[in-house]
Image (cartoon, grey):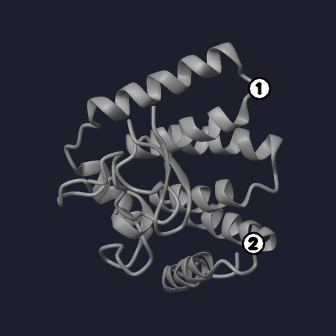
Amino acid sequence: MAILKCPNCGQTYDTRYMLYCARCGEALPNERGRLPPKGPYDGMGARGGWSPGKAGAGSPVAAAATTAAESWEPSDAVKEMVLGYRNQLNETPEDHTTRYSLALAYLYARRFDLAEQELLQVLQAMPDYADAWERLVFIQARLGKVQEAKASAHRALEIDPNNGQLRHWLRELEKWLEAAGEGDQ
């Protein structure tokens, strides 16, 4: 099993499962240096899925509805990744690193509801885990939980005040809430 680092942001990844970086969304080279083929991306921030400004009719809810309507099936590698992390958690349920990895696997499988559940458990044990808060913002927006996403973004920015992407997402969430008549609730 080869563990490599994203050439863009330095996040480590396992080449068996990862085509795109979980942190920055960039295409990841495999152990031979080859990038994945161009095509539909796996739903991560910079490379697809909901990102403020790309949400269809201007709403994360519209993006979530669009995604739900797509007939998309996760790859065998993603299914294997989910199963592997679930099996690991059966053996060591207190391992929050594995739980975070399972949440990302559910994210790749577009099971946003399960990814949110796992991340909430991780954050209950590790409330200052900024990356987990950032992923939760993305997932809650995809689920149409815009107020929750806004609250999660505020929490993430308390931990990581220099995160420009989170600041951008928060502005877009606030604009959407204002347009929907739900601002500052």
Which residue appears at 58% of the width and 45% of the height?
A: 116
Residue type at mark 1: give it: Glu
Horizontal relation, residue 123 to residue 134: left or right: right
Quadrant housing the C terminus: bottom right
- In front: 179, or 14? 14
Q: Secondary structure at mark 2?
A: loop
Q: Residues within 10 Å of mark 1 (few under 14, many from 20)?
A: few
* Residue at the front extreme of this rendering: 32
Q: Position of residue 121 (x, y in %)?
A: 72, 38
Q: Which residue is mark 1?
A: 94
Q: Which residue is mark 2?
A: 160
CA–CA distance in space, label 2 to label 1: 25 Å
Decide: is 139 above or below 75: below
- In front: 29, or 71? 29
Q: Position of residue 42 (x, y in %)?
A: 33, 53
* Disc on res. 162: none
